[in-house]
Amino acid sequence: MNQRKITLDINLINALRKFLPSRAEEIIANPELFCTPFSGGFSGRSPFKLTIDDKMYVVRQLNPNVDNDIQALTNKHNKATQVKSTDDEFLSILNKYRDVNLREITGNHIADDNKIGPKIHYQDSLVIITDLAAGTPINSNDYMDPVKIAEVIKSLTKLHSAPVDQINVQSSDKMKTLTVTDRCGFYLHMILDHDAGYSKLFHDIDTKMKKLDEAMTIMATKLNIPTTWVHADFWGSNILYDASKPNDERVSLIDWTDCGLGNPYYDLAYFLNYGFNPATNKILDDDYTKKLLRGYEMSSNNQSNADNHDLFEYLKVMREFCYLRQGLWALSMLVEKNVKYDPGKIADVSIDELRRMLYTKETSNSTTNGLELLAKCYLKRFMNDSFVDDYVERASRLKAPTLQATTPFTNK
């Protein structure tokens, strides 16, 4: 029994009355008997477990104050920069957040329809109630299990193959998720708006980021990379695995907050970056990336791309953008805590060492030290001029030899 005081707001009360009319008043009167908050505490928008007899559900409230949140950030940005133009880059990125609830609802329905996520029992404009997804999150050891990874890849290809042509032209713009460049730009502006002392860092990263983004855009066009549904937060904690289920239903994807139409290789890159090989104490290398890419393309019935060297190089650049995103996120968290980012404050650490420390829980990305390590490691890597130039040059080479065929992950 959960003894913590729980308050259900009017949106949740209305949803419960429609979902379980025969039990709603009992739940509303004694929510502590039926509702269990997930880690992170209970608030009006925190998801919680609802237990009714022997059935367990997840109740998730969407953000009812999106416009107010955007306005608050806009006001802070205008005050910090004295910029009030509607063409301002940051305000343009913020505007893409307006339809975040619609995209999250759509993502949950795609997951339900394709059996890659929990079944939806109730949904309105602000509340979603689903089954409690079974399974345990994918961890670094699981990355070394070819059967599990093959099933994860298969679930991802189901998502990326979900039809997008049913959306009309007017709705398609609302469904576009933020690109990785948008996300990096968002964190950069948040950092600068909070502390103008980061102006040089902002300029240096912004210049390099746009240089690399331009090269990637050209490369994506030449490679004919499609726009698909993407999860956009595709990492272990949002991927649950249940070995007791049939093969095609063992993977369940959760947390569709960032879902939308976007670049499918962003999901792959994000997933790769959270991996770690405990046997070698290193991040996932080129051989692993090739194997994962080949398995993904074959699962997507794109055998012609299975050994595409250019696509492999593109995925590597996307991985670097994802590292940059995580570094900027970490720095934005430090700035919000009023912790100054001091490159000389802590010893240099490689990505391999950082991922090992996270894997062995020597540090956590929720602590100040963990955030400093993330920011220092990932941002210092990106700030290297030759590093960025090297990837820009790689992105310009689209006629490299085909990769030597490698055995993909398979569950056969």
Image (cartoon, grey):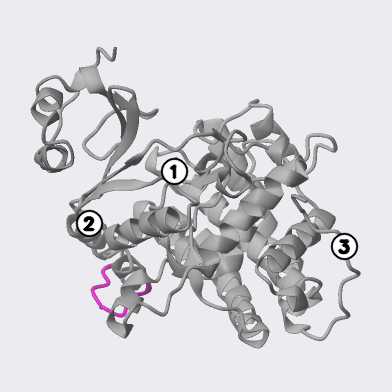
Task: Tell me the CA gap for discs 1 and 3.
Answer: 40 Å
Relative placement, left or right, of 411 versus 195 is right
Mark toward the start of the polypeptide (1 vs 3): 1
Mark toward the start of the polypeptide (1 vs 2): 2
Find the residue positioned furthest to the front.
246
Q: Is residue 60 magenta?
A: no
In the picture of the structure, the residue carrying the numbered disc 3 is 406
The amino acid marked with disc number 3 is: Thr
The amino acid marked with disc number 2 is: Val
The amino acid marked with disc number 1 is: Met
Label 2 Cα neighbours within 10 Å, binned few <14 / some 14-19 / many ≥20: some
Q: Quadrant of residue 79?
A: bottom left
Q: Which residues are magenta?
A: 82-89
Front disc: 1 or 2 = 2
Residue visible at 76% across and 49% down?
284
The chief SS type of the magenta part is loop
Residue visible at 10% across and 42% down?
14
Front disc: 3 or 2 = 3
Relative placement, left or right, of 115 versus 170 is right
Front disc: 1 or 3 = 3
In the picture of the structure, the residue carrying the numbered disc 2 is 66
Identify the image quadrant of the N terminus: top left
Mark toward the start of the polypeptide (3 vs 2): 2
In the picture of the structure, the residue carrying the numbered disc 1 is 333
Residue 135 seen in the figure? yes
- Residue 194: % across, % down: 35, 52
- Residue 106: % across, % down: 34, 61
